[in-house]
Amino acid sequence: MGSGKSFLFLAFLFSTTLFAVPSRVDEIVAKAHSRQLSHKKEWLRLGHYKGRTSQADGMDFFNAPNGKHDPDAELEGTIRALTGEVGYCRFPARLDFLRRHLPEINDIVKPRVCPKFEMYRETLAARSVSLVFSSYYLNNPASAFGHTFLRINKADSGKEGRRFELLDHGINYAATVTVENPILYAIYGIFGLFEGHFTRVPYYYKVREYNDYESRDLWTYDLNLSPEQVNRLVLHLWELGSTYFDYYYITENCSYHILSSLEPVMPDDVELTDGLPYVVVPVDTVRAIAAVPGLLKQVSFRPALRTVFDQRLALLDGPETDALEETINAEKPGTPRLAELPPQSRAAVLDAAMDYVDFMHFKELIKEEENAPARWKQKLLVARSQVPVVTGDVVSEPTLSETPHKGHATGRVGLDVGQEQARGATLGVSWRLALHDLLDPMGGYPDIAQIEFFRTRLLLLADRQQVKLDDFSFFRVISLSPWNRFSRKMTWKVNVGAQTIRDESCPYCLGAFGEVGGGLTLRPFPLERLFVTFTMDTTLALTSAMKSFARPGFGPTLGIKAGLSADLNFLVQGGYRYYLFTPNPHSYLASAEARWRFLPDLALNLAAFHGPLGTEGNLGLFVYF
Amino acid sequence: MGDTMKKSILILAAFVFVGVASARPYGTAGCGLGNLWFGKNSQILAATTNGSSANQMFGISTGTSNCTDDGKSASLRLPIFVEANKIALANDIARGNGETVTTLAKVMGCSETTGVGEKLQSNFASIFPNERVTTQHVSETIVETVKRDSRLAADCKGLI
């Protein structure tokens, strides 16, 4: 005893440090590398790597200093981090992956209690997952192309589980906006200067936001995921909550990262984000899901407030509709026409009136102040509750061709041959990034909206052997809102880009161009697809080819859009313009165009135009891709 | 009095204090739609970000938020639901039926959810007496109304 044994002990310690016996952690890291785990698709998807670089930008997502650019180092860093509490509780999906491919990791990673994570998992109570598409909303640019988010369901989805959807949770990816100025907002959004975060929101908030406040239809795409896939998704979403991605409105946007969050739980051979075009339009991410065999279980529809109102209105007969109009105008429910009706009718009219006040005044109603709409709504509610009739469930089953992912492809190219009175034979090449115009096949898209991004037409003038840029739109949006007794929204249009001037103020000069117009749209006959639009338009053309450089103008435009079927559409327009700063102030335009989609991705287009410089026409073929 | 006595009184006082504190009306006011989207804590351009204005409030890993029911006592589940769904709930109760009132019944633990709307319809004016009614009043009156019906009271196990 004593100094002898102590000496031996010290000698032993000395020799172990001298020969640096590798720790169990080092052994496991070595095993992970020898099994090439960091090359596995699941690992790369969990880290959101594209090539060797991760798209994630928050440093909390990485456990190695250069983890963002090195999936191998990140694997090692993760293994080490999992031995500690922070790492263990932050990366449950990575731990799950390692446990499956490297069971030895259980030697160094002991189970721990992670209270926040457990509460999150318990609250979600995930049984199935759905992708929700919120339809096109033209009132603000970020929503013009629609939006997608996930819904984590507490029930295996199906018509039965539908009844308590409100208690499910939505998982949303969106930019955290830090500026108020709209121009800065656009710049930041396009150039990735906002952070994008994943959030977990009770689904009822999403329903109120989209269905009620913004009056947007919601399409739910139920996904066919196994219980294990659902569980792994829940784990991975927790990991995503700890980080952010730079938000790029055009590429890595809301719908892109919702898709990327699903990828780690997909089998290796299923690619979701790689198949997307560079510019990510939300409906294309839905198409990516639908394209995977067996992934899409079913589609269901949740109508917007305005859609429900339209349905109720359609079911009212003559006297009921008159009573509705009277009730709405009088702003009191005790009107004579209403009192004459039997209880069932009274209930139907009041139901419609309630929806009307809701979508017209939602913003004021949610403020919960004493304002006129709130008082008026309260009277309606009391009156309705006194009619001893129970309203039936809202039933809404749109046809398959109306579902967003069945609409025509978002990109379009075209080739046309034609003739111009002044310039001779023409060959036109056109191209559009996204999305839909008034002549494109309907079905899956709003009938009465035009949303275009980067529309370009090049013209080859055969006789002059010239190639010119004829027309370019950075964005062009038209929103037709047909008036009826209960809807008086303004029709408006915006166009920003470049155009070739087709009048005497500067014949065939190319100039920067902007146009803004407002007016109204009518549906003069009870035909579903016939619209007559009248707008007052203001334009501005800028070109160095004119002495004045700027040429403002204004004037009325009349347009008629007729759809004989979803695939055959006509548009006739005529307008007068008065231009300033030019010796030729008067001008006019008249055009007629027809488009016929004869195959799923092909359409024939016939166009004619007449203006002060003469007539022109062309016949073309469009390909949707 | 002895040390044990003093301690017991202090502990008792603490329980009473906590009891009183939790009986105070829950601060759901910040979780109504108006406050969430247009209140002081919302982002000005909330409507343009395609996301709930409460991006910070609903972070996945930030744990519970004021406006979700995870981690909260069962007695708060009903007021939280009512606060966020007030307009739709009023509509459904006036109509005697609807998804929101059916879901409300589920929150109250009823196994038979369809009869609740009709029962509440005839009591609409006491549940929603005016346009400035508080969430607390709505929740409490709904619970009272359901309890008064013996069939529903037996069926809705989550009533507090």
Image (spheres, coloured by chain):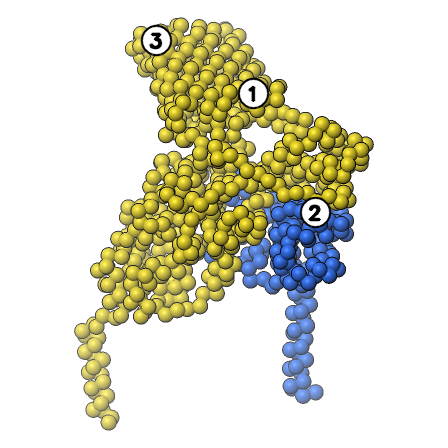
Chain colours: A yellow, B blue
Mark 1 residue crowding within 10 angstroms, few (<14) / some (14–19) / many (20+): some
Query: In terms of secondary structure, where does tag 1 sit?
Result: strand
- Is the residue under label 1 in contact with that under label 3 (CB below 8 Å)? no
| Amino acid carrying mark 2 in the image | Gly
Identify the residue at horizontal 20%, vertical 91% (top origin): A4
| Amino acid carrying mark 1 in the image | Leu
Query: In terms of secondary structure, where does tag 2 sit?
Result: loop
Q: Nearer the viewer, residue B16 or B44?
A: B16
> Is there any visible trace of residue B147 in the rendered image?
no
Mark 2 and mark 1: Cα distance apart in space: 38 Å
- Is the residue under label 1 in contact with that under label 2 (CB below 8 Å)? no
Mark 3 and mark 1: Cα distance apart in space: 34 Å
Q: Chain of mark 2?
A: B
Query: In terms of secondary structure, where does tag 3 sit?
Result: strand
Identify the residue at horizontal 61%, vertical 63% (top origin): B74
| Amino acid carrying mark 3 in the image | Ala
- Residue lying furthest bottom in this view? A1
Please tell me whether residue A143 is drawn above or below residue A60 in the rendered image. above
Quarter of the image with the N terminus of chain A is bottom left
Mark 3 and mark 2: Cα distance apart in space: 68 Å
Q: Chain of mark 3?
A: A
Q: Nearer the viewer, mark 3 or mark 2?
A: 2
Residue at mark 2? B96
Q: Is residue A139 left or right of residue A418?
A: right
Residue at mark 3? A425
**Where does the image place residue A522, in percent across and percent down from the top left?**
61, 21
Residue at mark 1? A530
Q: Is residue A528 left or right of residue A278?
A: right
**Picture quarter containing residue A332?**
top right
Identify the residue at horizontal 31%, vertical 10% (top origin): A462
